[in-house]
Image (spheres, grey):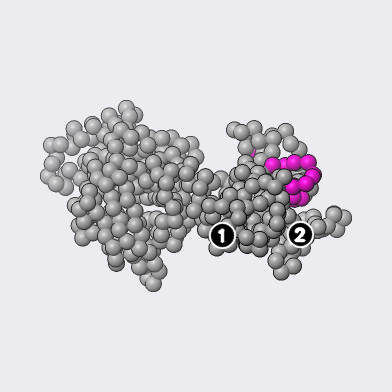
Amino acid sequence: MASIDVIGAEVFLEGHTALAGLSLNIADGEAVAILGPSGCGKTTLLRAIAGLQPLHGGSIAYDGVDVTQTEPAERGVGMVFQNYALYPHMQSQGILGFYYKLRGLDAEVGDRVQGVCDVMGADFGALLKRKPGELSGGQQQRVAIGRCIIREPRVFLFDEPLSNLDARLRAQTRVEIKRLLRRFGVTAVYVSHDQIEATAIGDRIAIMRDGKIEQIGRYRDLHAHPLNTFVATFLGTPPMSLIRGVIEDGFIRLTGPGSEPDPTAPAPIEDEPWREAGRTSAPAGIVRIPMGVRPELQVGTGIILGWRPEAVRLMPAGDGTVQAWVVATEPVVADRQILVTCALAMTNEIGSDVSVIVRARAPATAELNRDDRVHLGFDPDEAHVFDSDGTRRTAVVYSTG
């Protein structure tokens, strides 16, 4: 096994910066999941670690030994691709043993294949006489993983290996992958855009954006203490609700959406359903919530507040609540709750009407319909505070009453 050190890695592809001075340390035997939006550089990073993508700057080391110029075949890497990359004319047994046949070690193939069958489970042997075209997606994935195991690699690299599987097979296969990694203690890098996969497989999760790692750590730490609004909204299902605000004496005036675009945000106020004929007009105006901040944030300072859905409650109208309208509801069966997506109407700093999307939790017994008027209460102890540029503040907001 091997530790991996990526030091200042730079990759430029057709005028685009794929990796921008990225650095990452992965301990021996650790599994790190790389999570980020499409085009952020996840696969480029994986290919660079494998040696398939040359670096234009920086270096990569295994166990402290620079392998930047080492050929991929000499790095001891096992890689599972998104499209499996199985030889269509070979039976699974031939695919597994091909690595050793190329090196003239035919006598070892039988024992090696049997060892993989012991690891992958008794039913794996039934796949050995079948070609990839005769296997389901999940079975092809198991063969691809078995092909990596038989090589006894120093490093396992996974490039979104479960994206072609249905939900049931994804759940089954990610458990199998985690079991194998635990059993062998193999250093692993797992690239995904799926938070569930990243959380299930990675000991740590690295959040990438624009060729850089924004934050790395355990899931619960990233979820509870995001370093910026990008991490805050990217990690978590549903994402954190962000609202811009201005500090006033004993209050925070809400002024509009946060810094990260939300694709589920409602349309402008004038186009909202509650503006239609026969309905009550949405009273956009000054919206304040009774909250204070530590003294280092002065009155008039612009900030961004963030709340997870569990920190927002539907409450009776009263002091400290904010009026909103229901946009959609979704059942959260496991928690016996419903997730309520609401729209808040308010006036921004320049006097224009704007709307902000906020998600809240409610009991499963709550009867709510689209366009219902509700009142939201925000838990000050669960608020996340960011500067106006989206970076996290250590200042803590608190209730003023």
* Residue 286: assigned label: 2
- Asked if residue 270 is positioned above or below residue 385 in the image, the reply reads below
Whether residue 321 sits left or right of residue 33 in the image: it is right
Which residue is more in the foreground, 100 or 136? 100
Q: Which residues are magenta?
A: 313-331
Q: Residue furthest bottom?
A: 15
Measured as percent of width and height from the top left, residue 102 is found at: 16, 47
Q: Residues within 10 Å of mark 2 (few under 14, many from 20)?
A: some
As helix, strand or loop, the secondary structure at mark 1 comes to strand
Q: Residue furthest front?
A: 295
Amino acid at circle 1: Asp
* Residue 387: assigned label: 1
The tally of labels here is: 2
Measured as percent of width and height from the top left, residue 149 is found at: 27, 39
Amino acid at circle 2: Ile
Residue 77 on the magenta segment: no
Q: Earlier in the sequence, mark 1 or mark 2?
A: 2
Measured as percent of width and height from the top left, residue 82 is found at: 38, 50
Measured as percent of width and height from the top left, residue 333 is found at: 62, 34
**CB within 8 Å, label 1 to label 2:** no
Residue 87 in view here:
no
Which residue is drawn at the image coordinates 48% and 56% (left, top)? Answer: 37
Which residue is drawn at the image coordinates 42% and 50% (left, top)? Answer: 216
Which residue is drawn at the image coordinates 26% and 34% (left, top)? Answer: 116
* Residue 173: assigned label: none
Looking at the magenta stretch, what is its main secondary structure?
Answer: strand
From the image, which quarter does the N terminus lie in? top left
Residue 106 in view here:
yes
Q: Residues within 10 Å of mark 1 (few under 14, many from 20)?
A: some
Q: CA distance from mark 1 to mark 2?
A: 21 Å
